[in-house]
Amino acid sequence: MIRRAMGQEAVILHTRRVRGPGIRGWFGRPWVEVLAAADEPAPAVKTAFTPAPTPGRAPPVSIKAPAAPVSAAVATPVAADAVPAFSHPVLGAGRLRRRLTTLEAGIPGTGAAPRPTNGLQDRLVAAGMSSAAASAWVDAAVALGDASVKGMGQALRNLCLPPAPVAPGHRRVVALVGPTGAGKTTTAAKLAAQAVLEGRRAAFITADNFRVYGQEQLQAYAGVLGVPALAASSPDEMGRAVRELAVAELLVIDTAGHNHRDVRAMAALKSLLAAAQPDMTLLVLAAPTDREELLAQCKAYDRVNFNGFCFTKLDEVSRYGGLLDVLFTVRRPVHYLCTGQDVPEDLELADAQWFLRRIWPESGDGA
């Protein structure tokens, strides 16, 4: 792979194991990252490290190969626990030393930082992010050409997306899923209350038949708001309820919280959602949850094909690294932020600046 990308005189300088992209990479087999260099300019390849340029020398490049076998037409399989040895033409000691000296800054732990980070990554780790996710965020800002707090905001903006407005005469069906105690019912009430205050017709469907007073709580919210609420405990009942509430411009489905490790419960939830056909399925995650548990919940609820997040209980924490890890690992956007228990006041549209102001309070609103 190195020779195809960089030519026959390419030299392997460094190898290491890394996680693959996305949530599958987090839980799957590791990849192998190979750092190589050549005298002649090579085809454009994703750069992992960018040392200071030296005239007449090409910068090192990093080619990531999955540990699992890949198509033979693309690359030879590479196993993470057995990195194959790459042979290369015999080079004179002076020539090889010049290559290594030129590329020394690009090898981890050998010299100056290959990219200007201005302490950004350290601040993110201090805020509770993992080193891998923090590095991914900084890399995204560097790729945009702005290694500053403002650039960090630009890199986060695509993962903090308010929902698109609903056109007049159309409706939106929103299903809320997530573990027990994440705040789904309160979030459902906030969404419906905001719709009512905007002059739109709202309605509820509750599929929470497990929690004590779960349905009663949503019925109470419905009574206060003056909107209908139906219960559904099976796919047939769910389909019928969705049809009966067809006049609602916003239909919010509140599902039961389960142990996300319960495969049968997740299968039942998937069947209910298939009958409802929601426009948005939001995974509701509580901010005080441990980072590793948040990622485990994302992996489990991936079975129901959620397409965005709602982060709740943000007023109960002072560090937001776990939630940011979720965004940069799972790569699905957060749409809503719940900052307290008040209905409907404590529901905000997702905004990258919200996180920036809490990680870099000195930046103000101009970041």
Image (cartoon, grey):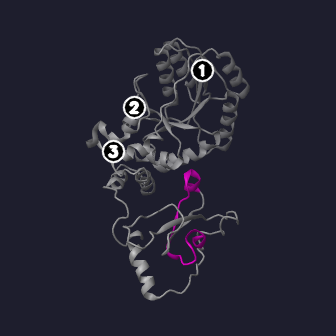
Mark 2 or mark 1: whose residue is earlier in sequence: 1
**Position of residue 35 in the picture relative to residue 3 (left or right):** left
Name the residue carrying label 2.
Answer: 339
Can see residue 321? yes
Q: Residues within 10 Å of mark 2 (few under 14, many from 20)?
A: some
Name the amino acid type tagged 1: Arg
Front position among marks 3 and 2:
3
Question: Which image quarter holds the C terminus?
Answer: top left
Name the amino acid type tagged 3: Ile
Indicate the position of residue 225 as horizontal and vertical percent values. Answer: 50, 14
Name the residue carrying label 1.
Answer: 171
State the residue at coordinates (57%, 56%): 25
Height in image: 273 above or below 153?
Answer: above
CA–CA distance in space, label 2 to label 1: 26 Å
Q: Secondary structure at mark 1?
A: loop
Chain part drawn in magenta: 1-27
**Position of residue 136 in the picture relative to residue 149 (left or right):** right
